[in-house]
Image (tube, rainbow, N blue to C red):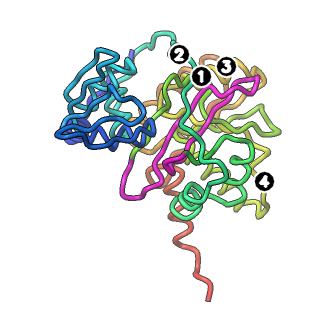
Amino acid sequence: MEYKKFTPEQLDRAKNADLIEFLRAYYGFEFKQAGRYYQCEQHSSLIVYADRKGFVWNSKNISGGDTIDFLRKVESKSFPEAVEAIIGETAPVVCQPAPAYRSEPGKLVLPPKAEGKYDRVFAYLAETRGISPAVIADFMKSKQIYQDTKGNCVFVGFDEKGTAKFGSVRTTLTERKYRGDCKNSDKRYAFSQIGTDTTKVYVFEAPIDLLSHCTMTEQAFGKIGAYKEQTRLALCGSSDVALKAFLERHPEVKTINLRLDNDEAGRTAVSKYIAKYQALGYKVNAVFSKNKDVNEDLLKKEQKKPKRR
């Protein structure tokens, strides 16, 4: 079992989150003011109170006082899952033996795609995150990345049959730090990239770190597409649910290269996974970033490059 302890500041942010702004980013819901309340345009029985925190969804007979209540009652998320979805941050994890993973029932709900539009996502990944334009184009072509109708970046994971099973949304607005998994996402099929060599897998926490590693590989070899030799997996968190399922689908994997975040949660998880997977017969390597994560390493590296004149 894993339990998490959030800081008072994190809890305060989650409890006082603007429910309307959250639902716009998370579901694409829009609201119109109706007297002292706000009414959802997509679901007329969903009403948000004037404080933009409390709500009532009459058709579902559900009500609550904040965004945490909404996620717990509408999506059946646990308290930690709800807080993480709202603030886009993970609390330090205290690890104990975990129970078997159970995917959420129901079909994956991905936000609607902005057909023919990719400018905001491309600019965010390339300019803000430093990802190679060639890498971004490859993942967009494979439909693993797209821009939704709200301008958010959506990362998609597929099963063996090519059916989308996992989705994660991240805002492209630099002044906000929203991110969260889509409804009914199955972490066993988290974001990944299969290379020509599947005997080794590089493991990251976030899709952006995976893309950053692809970019750094291209830079190291001085060749577009050089990253396609390696195989990569983003856990979309620090739980190893995705890794365990990936290894079951790819028995040819012999080496696990862990590149989790250089923070308390990442270091705790790495220590646990080294012991766990070495005991299962895998060769396990772990490298921590000089900065918080792989993307920060990439950005720091780009900042040190001499500017062209």
Q: Are marks 3 and 4 in contact (CB under 8 Å)?
A: no
On residue 281, which mark appears? Answer: 3
> 51 or 280, which lies in front?
51
Q: Can residue 53 be seen in this view?
A: yes
**At label 1, which amino acid type do we have?**
Arg
Q: Does the magenta stretch include residue 237?
A: no
> 241 or 113, which lies in front?
113
Q: Is residue 285 visible?
A: no
On residue 69, which mark appears? Answer: none
Q: What stretch is highlighted in magenta?
A: 149-177
**At label 2, which amino acid type do we have?**
Ser
Quarter of the rendering containing residue 31: top left
Q: Residues within 10 Å of mark 1 (few under 14, many from 20)?
A: many
| Mark nearer the N terminus (2 vs 1) | 2
| Mark nearer the N terminus (1 vs 3) | 1
- Marks 3 and 2 sit apart, C-alpha to C-alpha, by 27 Å
> 262 or 237, which lies in front?
237
| Mark in the foreground, 4 or 2 | 2
| Mark in the foreground, 1 or 3 | 1
- Marks 4 and 2 sit apart, C-alpha to C-alpha, by 34 Å
Q: Name the residue under label 2.
A: 103
Secondary structure, mark 1, is helix
Q: Mark 4 points at which residue?
A: 226
| Mark in the foreground, 2 or 1 | 2
| Mark nearer the N terminus (1 vs 4) | 1
Secondary structure, mark 2, is loop
- Marks 3 and 4 sit apart, C-alpha to C-alpha, by 29 Å
- Marks 1 and 3 sit apart, C-alpha to C-alpha, by 21 Å
